[in-house]
Amino acid sequence: MRACVLTASGGIDKLQIKEVPDAPTPKAGEVRVAIRAAALNHLDLWVIDGLPGAADRFPHIVGADGAGVVESTGADVSTVRQGERVMINPGISDYSCEFCQAGEHSLCVNYRLLGEHLPGTVAELVTVPAQNVARLPVLAPVVSWAEAAAFSLVTLTAWRMVVTRAQLKVDETVLIWGIGGGVSLAALRIAKLLGARAIVTSSNDVKLAAAKDLGADVTLNHRTQNVGQEIRALTNKRGVDVVVDSVGSATWDDSLRSLRRGGRLVICGATSGPQVGLDLRRLFWHHWSVLGSTMGNAAEYAEIVRRFGQGELRPMVDRVFPLARTRDAYERLQRGEQLGKIAIEI
């Protein structure tokens, strides 16, 4: 089969389109999916650059998100059949550890991600546990393969952040950093679905205008405006109820500065760096909650798929590249030019 593989750590120039052995024949409880489209995530860039613990064997197939057709199934699979259209939840849990038994699959002690620890989706075939695929809902208008591929990782991540961890409520105000990426756009859609007021930031005015069209109540250019000061002014010095941050060290101080007393800061990433400083006196004096969040559990995935089927949650696709131009796609992602998810047509 054809796949985009990382031949060694160290950069996008180490990616090649190559013929590799087919994905394994599915064992009991597994399915093999013929991928029609894959989608890129910032996590992929970390893997490509040599993220510790990821891609320890080369060549390594990249990509976490994908959608396609069930090509074959192993024994004991009754949830999907050969020929059905599916999208893939890229987080693989063992369903047996104490956290899985409690329904917290993304806390699994053996948790792995496609494209990070396991062969990824930018390939003609991928084999995954049957519980990690969901039938593609029948929608009008018909959902493209690119949309289906772009949905799972960012929407599941944003849902857990906004709904489960931060517990955003109707009429509350949320600050979402870095609008334009998949997680931030999904967080915006979810916030508006919940009836919250959304303030979003970007350094790109085109992305801010697009966010306004998607329902953002206030947009801030964090390159030309002091976000912390603007938030204090917009909220009469009160601060926002929730901050959604996937940026990390570059936004940490302003995230805290923007929170109201008793506010919640939920974090899912550290694209600008993982190290931050914190005066613990501010933390306990203001009764802040700082919440980590990664991916989501099976129940949350079922819920976002249901809402996808109802048309309530849909991903924004920035651009679709052919498999042969996967390097170009990753370069666009690395430059931060995208508005939404970048997809690869297989």
Image (tube, grey):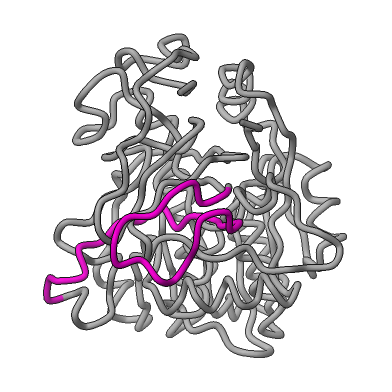
In the displayed structure image, the side of residue 41 where residue 115 appears, left or right: left
Location of the N terminus by quadrant is top left
Count the labels in the image. Answer: 0
Where is 79 relative to 20, above or below?
below
Camera-nearest residue between 265 and 9: 9
Q: Position of residue 56 (x, y in %)?
A: 20, 27
Location of the C terminus by quadrant is top right
Camera-nearest residue between 280 and 69: 69
Q: Residue at the bottom extreme?
A: 170
Where is 210 relative to 12, above or below?
below
Q: Position of residue 115 (x, y in %)?
A: 37, 37
Q: Position of residue 35 (x, y in %)?
A: 55, 40
Q: Quadrant of residue 119?
A: top left
Q: Quadrant of residue 8?
A: top left
Residue visible at 24% across and 66% down in the picture: 107
Q: Position of residue 15 (x, y in %)?
A: 45, 15
The part of the chain drawn in magenta is 69-98
In the displayed structure image, the side of residue 74 where residue 155 appears, left or right: right
Residue visible at 39% across and 73% down in the picture: 298
> Residue 117 lies in magenta, yes or no?
no
Camera-nearest residue between 306 and 237: 306
In the displayed structure image, the side of residue 339 where residue 34 appears, left or right: left
Where is 242 relative to 13, above or below?
below
Residue visible at 87% across and 60% down in the picture: 213
In the displayed structure image, the side of residue 128 where residue 3 appears, left or right: right
- Magenta stretch, main secondary structure, is loop
Camera-nearest residue between 84 and 203: 84
Residue visible at 29% across and 52% down in the picture: 277
> Residue 74 lies in magenta, yes or no?
yes
